[in-house]
Amino acid sequence: MKVAIMGAKGYPYVYGGYDTMIKELGERLVQKGVQVRVYNHRALFLEKPRFVNGIECIYTPAIESKSLTQLTHTFFSMVHACFSDVDVIFVVNSGNGPFGLISKIFRKPTAINVDGLEWLRPKWKGLGARYFYWASKMATQFYDQLINDSDEMRRVYLELFKTDSKVIAYGANPKENVGPEPLKKWNLDTRGYFLIVGRLVPDNNADLIIEGFLRSNSSRVLVVVGDVPFSDPWANSLKKIQDPRLVFTGYVTDPNELAALYSHCYCYFHGHEFGGTNPAMLKALGYGCAILALDTPFNQEMLQNGKHGWYFDKNPASVKQLVEKAEGEADRMDQLRKTAQSGLTQKYNWDYVADQYLEVFKELAGR
């Protein structure tokens, strides 16, 4: 069986959640005897080997602009795949929903992982939001199998688009805690800081977490890991806040440094609002963090309705209250850390995830 995968930056380019999924899934499928082809964004790869770790890499072009790069890359990739001998086409990102029409014309079996509620994200205002809503609706009509990564997102698609989907979660692996040495780079001490990890975009709510934390009486610091890859007024306004209890690290690309930041934080803040299964939350569970999460149906599902974390409402006062409560109940935070990895149930295991995708691909190829 030959499977083509497209819609992300490529392999083995690991930057975001989709790129990680393609790496973890593609390598496991190869081990199971599947011929895997990944469509890589040509401009991101200086070297362009045809095969990497048994995965065939095709380097397709794109119209390089902020709003068109990803969509045009998938368009060219879809056309190429439809003229090839692949048995199944797997696409990620609901923005690529309309391109399912091409594969339908060529009668190529397809699956799409639609991810989060892109049309609600603040960065897609006006036309962008309308496009993502329309594209998500088109995904339900043009692709043979719709895949969501959480039960709650399945419910949303049923409610909005009257279309059922198969739930296959995003994978994660429990991690070994690393030593505190990398923390010296930012003058941090074990359990001496709260942590945020994620892009500095409004829907991750770093602004209200920062405001609530700075209102609190905590003597710890708040470490903000992440940035945006372009100049952004909203992100810049956050980074201009001057307070000794606030540390912005920017991007942390060294995996050992990132592991140390997760492993030794007092609590991990998760403010992501519109996604399904979130990779940063899975990492926090994997590294044994005490988690304070925005109260959304997606975060409730991931933390098993409070078994593996506490929740705050979308306002600074709620964040302030939760910070002070967490500081006053150190034993409860210790208990959350000890049980965090048990939150990575079988559905979040990459081997199990790959087996589920393989079942889908076999069923599609057999049609």
Image (cartoon, rainbow, N blue to C red):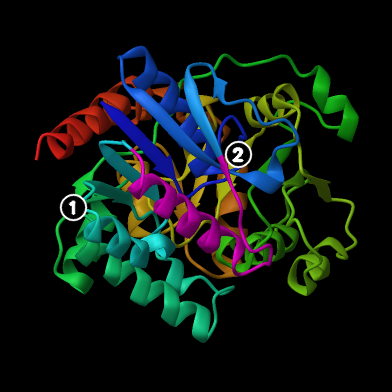
> Circle 1 sits in a helix, a strand or a loop, which is it?
loop
Q: Amino acid at mark 2?
A: Cys
Q: Earlier in the sequence, mark 1 or mark 2?
A: 1
Determine crowd level at label 2: few under 14, some 14-19, many 20+ residues with C-alpha closer than 10 A: many
Task: Pinpoint residue 285: horizontal percent, then vertical percent.
Answer: 48, 31
**Closer to the camera, 256 or 66?**
66
**Closer to the camera, 40 or 16?**
40
**Is 100 drawn above or below residue 363 in the view shown?**
below
Task: Pinpoint residue 44: horizontal percent, then vertical percent.
Answer: 70, 43
For discs 1 and 2, the disc positioned in front in the rendered view:
1
Q: Amino acid at mark 1?
A: Asp
Query: Which residue, given by chain and number where applicable, does mark 2 sit on?
Result: 267
Residue at image location 57% in from the left, 33% down from the top: 330
**Is 134 drawn above or below residue 361 in the view shown?**
below
Please report the bounds of the magenta region as a residue range.
Answer: 59-84
Residue 279: in sight, yes or no? yes
Residue at image location 33% in from the left, 67% down from the top: 136
Task: Pinpoint residue 17: horizontal percent, then vertical percent.
Answer: 51, 42
Whole-number angstrom distance, CA of label 1 to CA of label 2: 42 Å
Residue 196: in sight, yes or no? no
Label number found at residue 144: 1
Determine crowd level at label 1: few under 14, some 14-19, many 20+ residues with C-alpha closer than 10 A: some
Task: Pinpoint residue 320: horizontal percent, then vertical percent.
Answer: 62, 60
Mark 1–mark 2 CB contact (< 8 Å): no
Horizontal placement of 347 versus 162: left or right?
A: right
**Closer to the camera, 172 or 261?**
172
Please check the rendered image and state whether residue 256 is part of the magenta-colored stretch, yes or no: no
Q: Quadrant of the C terminus?
A: top left
